[in-house]
Amino acid sequence: MRLDGRQAVITGGGSGIGRAIALRLASEGASVAIVDINEASASAVATEIEKAGGTARAYVLDVADADAAVEVMKQVAEDLGGIGILVNNAGITRDNLLIRMSPDDWDLVLKINLKGTFNCTRAAARIMMAGRWGRVINISSVIGQIGNIGQASYGASKAGIVALTKTTARELASRGITANAIAPGFIETPMTEKLSEKVRDGLNSMLIIKRFGKPEDIANLVAFLASDEADYITAQTINVDGGMAS
Ligand code: NAP
């Protein structure tokens, strides 16, 4: 129970990697806020945690909405007694080749993935600062490091998250807050299940460990970074990618 007494917010916590993170942090003793644009999936994960004996609440938020992010973080702090851990996980793809990518799709991906991370960090940081302890954990991607055909907007948003993480770490360190990013490779979630067998085979051939990862592989690292054991780790991007970007 490394996270006993901590309060954790997980954006996009209703599905895939975010769901696995929420379940894991709750199992380590944290009270968790499942924040998602999808009310039904957020509530389902909160119910799953409560049934297992944990503490969880569901909140609806479009992370692209800065004002709503402030309101939701305030509400979470009131309900759970503060915010110690923020996992910026909500993210989308709108893939297309660069020359076919519409400016609107570009804007949407940047608005949710990168600005959404900024909005939630800005809103939660004020609350964390008051508690003089905090963990900001941002979910980036290997695609932000190596690029990918069809993923100009997604890769740019995920590279931006790395730079945002480093600034967050520098600005908040004096208040006992660390900020780190995780760069997953390809993980089995609803986001990747639409890939064809042919594409999957091609991707697997790029990996040292020749299979996709599981959401729990990311949750394991989040739990460690959120714990006191990771006190001296900040401004880092750690890959969980089966060796893909090495
Ligand atoms: P997922 O299964 O699609 O889950 C994402 C969750 O975020 C969904 O519940 C989604 O709701 C929610 N969401 C979407 N837009 C939102 C918004 N504007 N505000 C709040 N919540 C929103 O995706 P995943 O594969 O678990 O990915 C989670 C994170 O890991 C993302 O940041 C992704 O980029 C990153 N990542 C994933 C992989 C991978 O291989 N899966 C690899 C590297 C990085 P809806 O379902 O209603 O849209």
Image: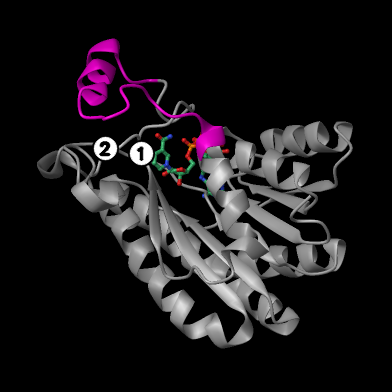
Q: CA distance from mark 1 to mark 2?
A: 5 Å
Residue at 57 percent of width and 42 percent of height: 219
State the mark number for residue 98: none
Check mark 2 vs ligand 1: CB closer than 8 Å? yes or no.
Answer: no
Residue 232 shown in magenta = no
The residue positioned 48% from the left and 68% from the top of the image is 118
Q: Which residue is mark 1?
A: 241
Three-letter code, disc 2: Met
Asked if labels 2 and 1 touch by Cβ distance under 8 angstroms, the answer is: yes
Q: Which residues are magenta?
A: 194-217
Q: Is residue 86 above or below residue 214?
A: below
The quarter of the displayed image where residue 16 is located: top right
Q: Position of residue 150 (x, y in %)?
A: 19, 37
Give amino acid for label 1. Answer: Asp
Q: Residue at x 68, y 76 (%)?
A: 133
Q: Which residue lies under the disc numbered 2? A: 244
Quadrant in the picture for residue 78 = bottom right
Q: Is residue 64 visible?
A: no
Q: Secondary structure at mark 1?
A: loop
Point out the image quarter for the C terminus.
top left
Q: Mark 2 falls on what kind of element?
A: loop
